[in-house]
Amino acid sequence: MSPLQRKATLLLLAGALALPVVSAARPAGQAPTASELRAAIAQPVSAIERRVLAPNIAEYFFKVRVGSGPYDQIGVHRVVKETAPNRPVHARQAVFLTHGDIWNFRAAFLTGTGTHSIPIFLAQNGVDVWGIDFRWTLVPATVTDLSFMKTWDLEQDASDLGIALGVARITRGLTGSGLGKVDLLGWSRGGQIGYAYLNYEAQIPSILRQVKGFIPVDIYLKTDVPQLQSFACQREANTEAAIAAGTYAATSGGLIQALGTLAVTDPNGSSILNGPPFNLPGYNNRQAGLLVGEATYLFLAPLEPTPFYHFTGGTFEIEGKPSGLLYTNEQNLFALEQGSAPFQPNQQLADADASTCGSTPVDFDDHLAQIKVPILYMGAGGGFGEFGIYTTTLLGSTDKTIHIVHKTSSTQRLSDFGHADLFLANDAQTLVWQPILNWVRTH
């Protein structure tokens, strides 16, 4: 089969597989539109890029068009062991990684120094690793009219995830690894999108489902803590007000990217946080970059998702300024910050908080009790940690494993293992990735 024929076959089969997924990722009883069906049947795919990540490990990347708009496209990644260049091994096990807020696949999962990243680790151990860039991560910072993002909601991300899963499975079939279902890993917001996708998949026949096991990483969709639920309600109201006022995207990624860049290029320079609206005098750029990781909750206050929520555990000077990281190389943190996407749809954020709040009905959490795939909840003591367990109790799964990484006692959350330490920490391979690999192999 020629490369052109192979690509045409891939598109046709991926489109055929995506048809039930499009229907699944919509409100119950609402049929897909004709344009959605056409998009699912003929997914235009970009040229495939390949780069070597480690000896015998390569990453393949391409974009898939999912609509008619200029930014209606998603990125699909594959990290896999090769027998020769452009010849992926036949891998029985596959894991699909879904990123969360601000960061795309590469920033979220491939930021570690050298080969220190979970996709490379899993691939070296024979797992076929896939991932998605949601369409909002591919919108350039130069775009000024963001009105097209007004309707970009969490259900759209769930639908795009279903298409990407279908493309991954068909590609695995064409390259000798079979058409079997895959495990889905969702970190942070990606975990919420994963719950939403599985909510819809629970409503369709088993033969049409694509996920065989789910690994929500450090996140909750629902909470039994009244204060956290109240915070979600307030965040939802604030975001809906911003949308009503014509602000369709959050731009915090641009700030984080700037702070990370300045921490590397001018570490001793005076930080932009010294002035309004932050008014944190006396910070240099390195300290500001560390603050994003060590005291993330300050940027979310007073409506933070968990007490003292942070990306990376760290140390502080007597006056409260961050002085260094406990578990992660700070250059990796700054690299993560530099990989931030400039925009994220406000409607997606509002939808997620609506589900947690519970006052505004949403369709993507109505069937959680019908989700019966095996579950591995992986948490970080200084991130969502134990707060993420409650959502798993609402599922119909009988096979549930809980693994939460702690470095301190529950009374010292600020210095405990953080939300991003799960993928960046020097000992993440031992504490996080190996348990994930073990679970994948036994499920």
Image (tube, rainbow, N blue to C red):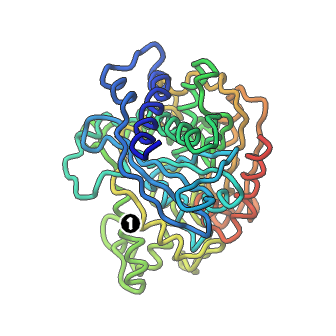
Residue 335 appears in the figure = yes
Task: Give coordinates of residue 329: x percent, y percent.
Answer: 59, 76
Quadrant in the rendering for residue 243: top left
The residue sitting at the front extreme is 1
Residue 359 appears in the figure = no
Can you identify the residue that label 1 sits on? 257
- Disc 1 on helix, strand or loop? helix
Q: Who's the residue at 38% across and 84% down the image?
A: 266
Tell me the crowding category of disc 1: few under 14, some 14 to 19, or many 20 or more residues within 10 angstroms, Cα based: many
Q: Quadrant of the C terminus?
A: top right
Q: Who's the residue at 41% across and 39% down the image?
A: 5
Which of these two is toward me, 56 or 26? Answer: 56
Task: Give coordinates of residue 313: x percent, y percent.
Answer: 62, 67
Quadrant in the rendering for residue 113: bottom right
Q: Who's the residue at 24% across and 45% down the image?
A: 146
In the image, taking residue 381 as reference, residue 308 lies left or right, namely left
Task: Give coordinates of residue 380: x percent, y percent.
Answer: 67, 56
Q: Is residue 13 above or below residue 207?
A: below
Q: Is residue 376 above or below residue 416?
A: above
Q: Is residue 243 above or below residue 269?
A: above
The residue sitting at the left extreme is 145
Task: Give coordinates of residue 73: x percent, y percent.
Answer: 35, 43
- How many marks are shown on the rendered structure? 1
Which of these two is toward me, 316 or 188? Answer: 188
Q: Is residue 132 above or below residue 207?
A: below
Quadrant in the rendering for residue 74: top left
- Name the amino acid, label 1: Gln
Which of these two is toward me, 109 or 120? Answer: 120
In the image, taking residue 20 as reference, residue 195 lies left or right, namely right
The residue sitting at the top extreme is 29
Q: Who's the residue at 67% across and 48% down the image?
A: 91
